[in-house]
Amino acid sequence: MEKNTKNAATISKGLLQSEELYRYILETSVYPREEEPLKEIRDITANHPKAVMGTAPDAGQLIAMLLKLVYAKKTIEIGVFTGYSLLLTALTIPEDGKIVAIDADRESYEMGLPVMKRAGVDHKINFIESEALPALDQLLKDSENEGSFDYAFVDADKVNYWNYHEKLMKLLKVGGIVVYDNTLWGGTVAMSEVQAPEILRGGRQPTLDLNKSLATDPRIQLSHVPVGDGITICRRIY
């Protein structure tokens, strides 16, 4: 297990100036407090061909604190992948808490599902195999869902982030929080398009557009945090 954990840690999600400094944060403050099921999912994810899509553990640590601060009980996850952030949420919210988890890729979700079952939290998860927009529309058809969610996490197709935001502003309660992942997009938001690595160019402009729109949205209080690949924390204020 220890060997696999070290291999998983080589996938850097940090934007700090040195790999050594990022590793210092992980090894001093993050990994010692990371629960064993989360380490197990991190190991499983390291063997996935798209392992870089996994939630950064330092971002996860901050998210767990946010969940506790808002006493989150009813949550939404858009983009599940192998389930690191989903498991993190399930471990953090109360025993009777619920998570609506939306992803069109059931195969990746099922890689992490056995870990969630062993952790005894799978009963909190309602996995919906679907594209996110129609699933959110379905939630909004039930008037009881409007303004009822405490927290949402979005780590999905970047081009639709603003579309998700508009729907989440209806689903979240006032005072609820939504966290958007990858909002610094490998640092390319501060580069010209020609400077950005080709593999990241497709998501660069949608991320720039999202950041600009969030910064001017009067419905939210926000903080753009340089952990992992950048997360933006938005608190609905009306």
Image: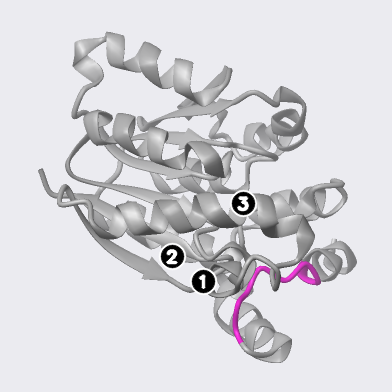
Disc 2 and disc 1: Cα gap in Å?
A: 9 Å
Q: Nearer the viewer, mark 2 or mark 1?
A: 1
Disc 3 and disc 2: Cα gap in Å?
A: 24 Å
Circle 1 packing at 10 Å, graded few (<14), some (14-19), many (20+), is many
According to the picture, the residue beneath numbered tag 3 turns out to be 203
Residue, x 25% and y 20% (percent of image)? 145
Residue 223 figure quarter: bottom left
According to the picture, the residue beneath numbered tag 2 turns out to be 62
Above/below status of 38 relative to 227: above
Left or right of residue 86, residue 2 in this image: right
Question: Can residue 64 be seen in this snapshot?
Answer: no
Q: Amino acid at mark 2?
A: Leu
13 within the magenta span: yes
Identify which residue, 77 or 72, lies in the foreground.
Answer: 77
x, y percentage for residue 170?
23, 29
Circle 1 sits in a helix, a strand or a loop, which is it?
Answer: loop
Cβ atoms at labels 2 and 1 below 8 Å apart: yes
Q: Which mark is residue 227?
A: 1
Q: Main secondary structure of the magenta part?
A: loop
200 within the magenta span: no
Residue, x 65% and y 31% (percent of image)? 117
Left or right of residue 210, residue 131 in this image: right
Circle 2 sits in a helix, a strand or a loop, which is it?
Answer: helix
Above/below status of 23 relative to 136: below
Identify which residue, 28 or 127, lies in the foreground.
Answer: 127
x, y percentage for residue 10?
81, 72
x, y percentage for residue 48?
84, 46
Residue, x 58% and y 65% (percent of image)? 229
Q: Amino acid at mark 3?
A: Gly
Segment tinted magenta in the rendering: 9-16
Left or right of residue 125, residue 201 in this image: right
Left or right of residue 156, residue 235 in this image: left
